[in-house]
Each structure stands twice: as structure tokens, then as C-alpha cells.
Amino acid sequence: MKICIPSMDNNGLFSEISVHFGKSPYFTILDVKDNKIEEIEVIESEGRHAGGKKTLAEIIIQSKPDVLLCANLGSKALQMFNKEDIKIYVGASGNVKNTFEEWKNDNLKRADETMVCKDGN
């Protein structure tokens, strides 16, 4: 299973998560098997906020994650991920490791339209 977590830097499990999904400078991909992290990949964002041509959601979709863990996100990103059958959980905080543990322990909420950011990010 591939889990994607928008992050502020490229420090792997110790990266702080990005609280502003659409402006996340990196995203950390965890390859997980039997609830254990087997591989970690950090990808630098080349989204529109970083001068690129794609949204962060489009870039993440290309990496084909099964799950996205984030603090929150906008309705457009939520719709894009739902269309691709990517499960989204919100309420993440702290670093990537903490966020993964919170998800593993069922402490993050499955995202829906009532939980999205009002500013679209």
C-alpha cells in the first residue's frame, strides 16, 4: 500500500507535515506492508505554487497512492482524489511518523465534503 503525506521538508519520517495542502513543498510516500513502513520516498513539489504547471493533487495522483493523510484540503482536491479512488484522511499533525501512527491507530477521520477548507486549499 502506498501512503502519501504532504510535508514541509525532505527529512523522511521526521518531516513536519504541511498544514496547507495546496502549497506543500514536498510529499512523502510510504510503501507499507502489514502496517509496517518498508520504503520511504520524498518528492519535491513542482506544483503551481512552486512555479509548475500542475496542481499538487495532479502530481500526487501520478504517484498512484492508495491513501492520502493530511491536515486538511480543499473540495477540488478531494473530488479529484475521490475520482481516482484514493482514500483521504484528515486531521494529521506533527511529523510524518506521528501522522502514520495516528492513521494506523484509526485516529484520523475519513475526509468528506463537510470537512474541506473553505478557501479551497
Image (cartoon, helix red, strand yellow):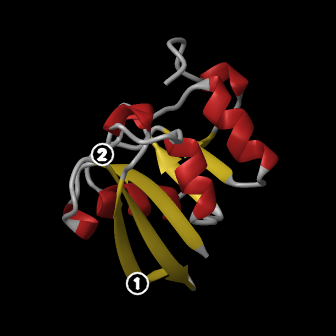
Q: Looking at the picture, how far across and down is residue 6, in whole percent?
A: 40, 49
Which of these two is toward me, 98 or 82? Answer: 82
CA distance for labels 1 and 2 = 20 Å
Q: Quadrant of the N terminus?
A: bottom right
Q: Is residue 107 above or below residue 75?
A: below
The image quarter in which residue 99 lies: bottom left
Residue depth check, mark 1 versus mark 2: number of the one nearer the observer = 2
Instruction: Say which element carries label 1.
Output: strand
The residue depicted at 69 percent of the width and 45 percent of the height is 81
Secondary structure, mark 2, is loop
Q: Is residue 82 left or right of residue 15?
A: right
Q: Position of residue 35 (x, y in %)?
A: 52, 79
Decide: few, some or many residues near mark 2? Use Cα within 10 Å; few <14, some 14-19, many ≥20: many
Query: What residue sits 80% from the left and 45% below the top?
Result: 83
Residue hosting label 2: 25
Which residue is disc 1 drawn over? Answer: 39
